[in-house]
């Protein structure tokens, strides 16, 4: 299957968002990241920061079962935790974008799972902890004494959100088309490699 969409999952501080933007610019296509959250928030009439907090509070299956048993008269949709509703709404918006745009880059939001049947070239960006903390301090302007803690919390949130909603394992590199160490390769080269691999893979379907 030809893969027309690039999805990127990334560790906090690995530069995955920036790399995705660079790759999109090189390909002349749009890049979606936080825009998905903002579009979801607009539809809900809720501040993006509130929905972002909802993503952080993904319930375990045990807690969800308790919720269902405690509210037997409510519909399944009413019983859904806000984090699940956010995921469903984001999935719908991503699907709508895929219907309108043949190719684009999507950063985060379980993109490789949501767009699996549409043909996506999935990428995972990672780096060693020391390099990620350094980037958080120098580029994200996080205070030195909080950078490591914020990094760990962000990774945990992304991992939990992905694992609960997809049934997969966020950092299982076997599920991605390409995995890149941004600390070793640098942002520019990572973007170039994504574009190169994406184009080379798709060439086989143009013959």
Image: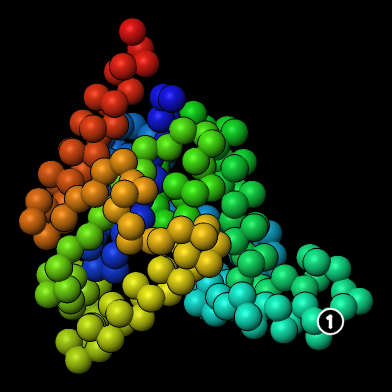
Q: Residue 17: x, y in percent?
A: 31, 56
Q: Where residue 66 appears, x then y in whole percent?
A: 72, 84
- Image quadrant in which you'd find residue 86: bottom right
Q: Residue at x 17, y 73 (%)?
A: 129
Q: Nearer the viewer, residue 126 or 136?
A: 126
Q: Which residue is pictured at 36% across the width and 81% down the height? A: 153
**Which x, y percent locates residue 87?**
59, 61
Res. 16 visible in picture: yes
- Residue furthest to the top in view is 207
Q: Check the picture and name the quadrant holding the C terminus.
A: top left
Depicted 127 relative to depicted 118: above or below: below
The residue that label 1 is drawn on is 71
Give residue 80's quadrant in the image.
bottom right
Q: Is residue 54 visible?
A: no
- Residue 60 shown left or right of residue 6 in the figure: right
Q: Residue furthest bottom?
A: 145
In the picture, measured across the screen, residue 83 lies left or right of residue 21, that is right
């Amino acid at each position: 299957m030809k893969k027309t969409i690039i999805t990127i999952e990334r560790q906090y501080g690995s530069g995955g968002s920036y790399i995705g933007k660079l790759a999109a610019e090189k390909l002349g296509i749009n890049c979606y990241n936080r825009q998905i959250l903002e579009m979801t928030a607009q539809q809900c009439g809720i501040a993006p920061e509130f929905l972002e907090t909802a993503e952080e509070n993904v319930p375990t299956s045990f807690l969800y079962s308790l919720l269902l048993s405690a509210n037997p008269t409510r519909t399944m949709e009413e019983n859904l935790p806000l984090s699940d509703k956010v995921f469903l709404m984001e999935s719908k918006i991503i699907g709508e974008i895929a219907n309108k745009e043949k190719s684009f880059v999507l950063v985060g939001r379980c993109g490789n799972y949501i767009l699996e049947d549409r043909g996506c070239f999935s990428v995972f960006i990672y780096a060693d902890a020391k390099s990620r903390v350094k980037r958080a301090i120098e580029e994200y302007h996080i205070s030195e004494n909080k950078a490591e803690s914020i990094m760990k919390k962000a990774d945990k949130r992304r991992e939990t959100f992905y694992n609960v909603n997809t049934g997969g394992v966020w950092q299982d590199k076997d599920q991605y088309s390409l995995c890149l160490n941004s600390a070793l390769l640098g942002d520019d080269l990572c973007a170039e490699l994504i574009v190169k691999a994406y184009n080379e893979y798709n060439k086989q379907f143009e013959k």
